[in-house]
Amino acid sequence: MSENFSSADFGNSTKRRLPICFCLDTSGSMMGNPIKQLNQGLANFLASIKANDDTRSATDIAIITFGSSVEIVMPFGKISKDKSLPEISASTTLTPIGEGVLTALELLDLRKKGYKEMGIKYYQPWLVVITDGAPQGPNAMANYHNAVAACNELEKNDKLVVFNIGVGNGVDFDLLKLLSVKRPEPISVNSADFGKLFEFLGSSSSSVVSSGMNDDALYNINAEPEGESVGVDDFFNFVEDEE
Amino acid sequence: MALEELGNYKNLVVDYSVIREFGGTAVFWEFMDRITRTSPDVYVSASFKLLHYCIVHQGDSKDDAAQSAMKEFCSMLLPLHKLHSVQTADTVEFIKTIEPINDCCIVLAKDGIFSKRIREKNIKIDKDILVLTPTDYCVFHGSEEFINAVPLPEVSKIALKKAYLDSAAFCNVGDKVITGSDKQLELTKRISSGAEGMVFLTDNRLKVAKIYHKNVITPLRWSKLTKMVAMGIKSSGICWPQDLLFYKGVPVGYTMFLGKGKTLGNIFDGPDAMFNNFPEWKREDIAATLINLIEKYLYLHMHNIIAGDIQLKNALLYSSNAVYLIDMDSVQVGNLPCPVGTEEFTDPRLWGRDFAGFVRRLEDEDYSIAMLVFSTLFCGLHPYATRNGAETLREEILERNFPYFLDNSEEEHIPLGGYNYIWQYLSPTLRTMLYNTFKLGRSYEALQWYEAVLEYKDNLAGHKYEDPEAYKMFPKMEYHATVDAEENTPGDRNSVAPGVKKRFNSLAEARQYSSGIHNPFAAAAGSSNPGMSGSAFSRPTGFDSPSAANNSPFVPKAEGNVLKPAAQPDANQDPKKKRFGLF
């Protein structure tokens, strides 16, 4: 299958890539304001990636939605200047999270194979799952547990960074928590906070590709500055002590 | 101080640090006076000339005294045929070469590159070592005594102090900040924002202000900035802190000169980026850019500074003649460490260590310089970017999975895109050094890299290579700039329709995988010569012989012109060569 990888699909940038696959809930409960906020957040996220010299050719993004079925809204490939994001809409009652996650893992795996074939360096991929509910639909539970097993296996071996994000209070956080073995609790946001969430994801991806931030730091969202906070007078005492 | 001891020796080995640090001071005049009176034979290594290039090219007025001192030194010794140059930039090699010279004393400054190399490598020397200081000097009998008396520094305690400045002082456009020398400066426009702070234009046209975000200023950072400002480095190519900044009495940042251009990482980023930015460029421009960069890092090394976080995004490039080092506030100054570094560019021996917890050595930076050399020559590529390699870059680096071979016998792991040709057409010296570094784990001193890249550039400038492909930015590749080269990014999946133009092709695609591709330099590189002995460095043919003076780079030429480097990078924009993308 390796012959199928066209180099044009990867660009000829020499940057180390960070593949990010978004896996988004488009079930009926997301209709209205939440989906609007989600679209807005994603659009801002992509815009900030494109505007930043460090992330533009290094960040590699795909978007998958799960509603009545799993859809690949945007496949991998360097973000282009003029392509805007297709509008994501919510409409159905099903929530096949498991199928969505499994598809995402497949896409990520394929992308990694492509990098290897091309000789492109990469960071370990990110899986960003955003849902406002719980698995629903035929075999949804069984598939979800398959997805959890696959995710956990990769994450344990430092081959995947998982962002499991719950929106609002209809989320089954116990189930969502299973997706990551490293994150103590799922990230919980209000749909009104999508802006902040995507800002965080954008700045984190920029930290990874520009300053080689450790993956472990991605699991610690509220990082306080290290050490003791001191006022101006004490600060100068410190500095002078040494001199 | 009288430096009488110097009169006891028939031979002196003089390190360039004596010129740079003491030129123009009483110590230097005393030193010259002694030499004039006793007229010893003076030996220097290739570093003497090379480091002086670096000084001259930075054009910092604070080094004027060093430049005059150099002239003084050479114009006194050369007519007498008393100055002998040993043609190696490698410290161990140099020491070995001067070993047979009896009745000899080594003269150096404590924190110069030579002194640090001797101490880092614990080189055994049975000669007296005279260490100059601004007010005094000290003679050690042998390197053991010297190393014991002048150990490598411990990390400053302030680096281990985990604290940060917490204050409500926050300034922005329109605010007036006060410099350490009590001048007022207004922030007029925000030009960038990063993880640590923001950069503003100011009402002083020449200076920009970096203002840190809240909670970012640590005691280490502030002590370092204070020290850096006091050093007074003013070279325009190094965006060095010039003045501290306070707002309402609270430390907030510093001023620096503004660098121009794009980051190196965004230009040296594969063929599209290279051709979009510099369609006219040749190999020689790449070599010139690299020389410019290495000179700046060597300049810092001479000042007891280790850059620490060398990477392509920490330099701005306007043209091959205008390169700026940026983000200088993280460097290691004396025993104030550089707390950051990336996995890609840092010597794997240092991985996992707390960078704030130890003083980096020159030898720690040699790997980063080698990385810089490779990734610049290969237009952004990482040496361990390999096809079908290990799962992570980490593993590739640790296993030294370098996909290039001296005899080009195997190319299947080299990333596609013509990088195999870049490798084939490099100078034999560079190929050998890169191979030894990244495949065999050897290391070369920064000065040796500088010397090797200078040689490569001189070969290109002097048309020493027969094959015209050797001069191209991407040898043997054809670049078709299409309209969408700028507009459309090639990686966009949606734009990849059948029949889409492949914009970057090999001229010899069919031969890409065949082994034993003709290499014009293969014979010279010689895989049977993995060591550097022989071809790469010419050893002096014995400086005791009368012909020794001819070996010296300091052949008396026109006055005042003695140390002009061989070839200056030419203005790289040649107007008659406007052939965008037609390679």
Image: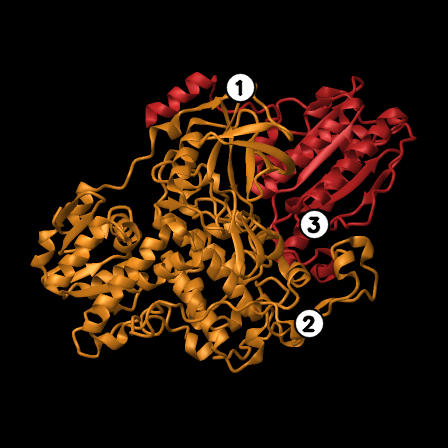
Question: What whole-number distance in Å separates the C-alpha atoms at marks 1 and 3?
Answer: 46 Å
Q: In this figure, which residue is indicated by the disc labeled 1? A: B167
Q: Which chain is red in the rendering? A: A
From this viewpoint, which residue is outermost toward the right? A91
Image x and y of residue A108, in percent: 70, 45
3 or 2: mark nearer the eye: 2
According to the picture, the residue beneath numbered tag 3 turns out to be: A111
Amino acid at dot 1: Ser
B30 and B392: which is toward the camera: B30
Same chain for the residues at labels 2 and 1, yes or no?
yes
Residues at discs 1 and 3 in contact (Cβ within 8 Å): no
Residue name at image x 74 percent, y 51 percent:
A77
Asked whether the residues under marks 3 and 2 belong to the same chain, the reply is no
**Residue farthest to the left, as pictured:** B8
The picture places residue A132, in percent across and down from the top left corner, at 80, 24
Q: Chain of mark 3?
A: A
Residue displayed at 13% across by 52% down = B142
Q: Check disc 2 and give the amino acid type.
A: Lys
Judging from the image, what secondary structure is the residue with disc 2 in?
loop
Quick one: which chain is orange? B
Give coordinates of residue B294: x percent, y percent. 44, 57
Q: Is residue B559 above or below residue A169?
A: below
**Quadrant in the picture for residue A37:** top right
Secondary structure, mark 1, is loop
Label placed on residue B578 = 2
Q: Nearer the viewer, residue B231 or B446?
A: B231
Three-letter residue code for mark 3: Arg
